Image (cartoon, grey):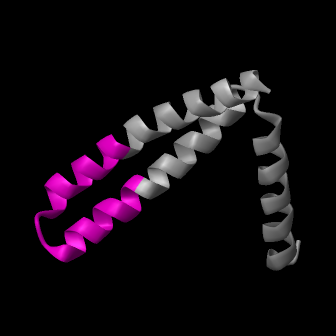
Amino acid sequence: MARLYRRLVAAAAVAALVGYSAAQDVDRMAGDAPAGSLLATVAGSGVLLGVYILSAKALRVTEVDVLTRHVRKRIATLAGH
C-alpha cells in the first residue's frame, strides 16, 4: 500500500510543478485583469490534471487505469458509439 502512495505522490509532485509553471506563464501573458487570472487558473488546472493522469499511468497506478477506462466508456456512450 505504501508503494501505491509513493507513486501517487510522485505523480502529484510532477503534475504540480508543470501545472504551476503553466499557470505562471499564462498569467504573465494574460496580465493582471481578473479574466487573466481566471484563464491562468483554468489553464494550470487543466495541465495539472492531464500531467497527473499521464504520470500515474506511466508509474503503472492501476486505479487510474480503471478510472480512465470508466470515463472513456461513459464518453463513448454519450457520444453514441
Q: Position of residue 73 (x, y in %)?
A: 86, 63
Q: In the image, residue 59 lies at what x, y percent?
A: 69, 25
- Whether the magenta-drawn stretch holds residue 19 is answered as no
Q: Main secondary structure of the magenta part?
A: helix
76 or 42: nearer the viewer? 42
Image position of 67 (left or right of 31): right
In the displayed image of the protein, which residue is found farthest to the top?
A: 3
- Which residue is drawn at the image coordinates 31% and 67% (left, top)? 39
The image shows residue 46, relative to residue 58, as above or below, that is below
The structure residue drawn at horizontal position 17% and vertical position 63%, both measured from the top left corner, is 30
Depth order, front residue of 31/8: 8
- For this orientation, the residue located farthest to the left is 32
* Region in magenta: 20-44
Quadrant in which the C terminus appears: bottom right
Q: Is residue 33 magenta?
A: yes
Q: Quadrant of the N terminus?
A: top right
> Nearest the camera: 66 or 30?
66
Indicate the position of residue 31 as horizontal and vertical percent values.
12, 63
